[in-house]
Amino acid sequence: MTIDPERLLAAQIPQIEQHYDWQQCIVYALGIGVGLDPMDEADLAFVDETRLKVQPTMANVMGYPGFWMRDLPLGLDWVRTVHGEHSTRIHRPLPAKASVRGTSRIVDLIDKGEGRGALIFVEREIADMHSGELLATVRQTVFCRGDGGFGGERRAQPAPHAIPAREPDAAIELPTSPQSALIYRLCGDYNPLHAVPAIAREAGFARPILHGLATFGVAGHGIVKRWCDGDPAALREMGGRFSSPVLPGETVRLELWREGPTRAAFRASVPARGAVVIDNGHLETA
């Protein structure tokens, strides 16, 4: 089925209301590899309800509307969609307990042409339900591999953030656990690709892979730990391009390049396989 761009841009993605507390915050932190060293006091602050800090990338699982590309009658070849780029803007430090509302909308659409796919740009605003205060804005680019050539606008997509051609200014090794995908799925993404070996094999993987946004969270944890001195309130924005999956249990290496007083570039990789997993990363701090 050929997609209708006007219909797609006018799509009503379900608005989600969600209440969370310290338990959901800790599950999220465990899912992105926090607490693997039980003697790391900096990490324990994210998994101890008596002094809880909240990982800023938890915004990615707040007000999550589910797999709307499959569930809404929009004519998308949802089986062939890929999460291409992602960014998260934190407007204020996330509280350890809140009721939030996630409002998602499609903000742009690019037709790459017949056989080349299409790009859908989606934005989700997460607000406190009681005060109305905006907590975070999440943006993602979805590459729809089977939906190009529908007659929509054809133009170049925004250029990715360039990584400096020099040695990084800082780096950190971030282990994940073999159970990381099984824990992270409790945050709301139940795609069996991340839990069922047979389905992972059907998709071309030797075993279940880690969720892309879990990898994004691993990088965010590393940024807070290595670049922000453990202070989650210091991270204002981060974004990047997904380039390869992580297998649960692998160690991710995060490299960072300073680009100004409050800006930096980053890249995440799995050195054991020589695979870059997040490329063209950028971040902003307070």
Image (tube, rainbow, N blue to C red):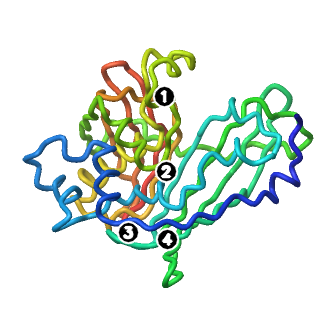
Mark linked to residue 244: 1
Q: Answer with mark 1 or mark 3, whichever residue precedes in sequence.
A: 3
Q: Find the distance from the CA under tag 3 to the CA under tag 4.
A: 11 Å
Assess whether mark 4 and mark 3 are in contact (beta carbons under 8 angstroms): no
Toward the viewer: 45 or 219?
A: 45
Q: Find the distance from the CA under tag 1 to the CA under tag 4.
A: 31 Å
Disc number lying in front (3 or 2): 3
In the image, is residue 233 above or below residue 130?
Answer: above
Q: Residue at x 32, y 69 (%)?
A: 96
Density class for disc 3 (Cα within 10 Å; few <14, some 14-19, many ≥20) is many
Disc number lying in front (4 or 2): 4
Q: Is residue 218 left or right of residue 143?
A: left
Numbered disc 4: secondary structure: strand
Q: Residue furthest bottom?
A: 131
Density class for disc 1 (Cα within 10 Å; few <14, some 14-19, many ≥20) is some
Disc number lying in front (1 or 4): 4
Q: Residue at x 92, y 41 (%)?
A: 151
The residue that mark 2 highlights is 239
Q: Quadrant of the N terminus?
A: top right
Amino acid type at circle 1 is Ser
Mark linked to residue 100: 4
Task: Report x, y in % for residue 282.
Answer: 46, 50
Task: Report x, y in % for residue 219.
Answer: 36, 44
Numbered disc 3: secondary structure: loop
The residue that mark 3 highlights is 94
Amino acid type at circle 2 is Gly
Mark linked to residue 285: none
Disc number lying in front (3 or 4): 4
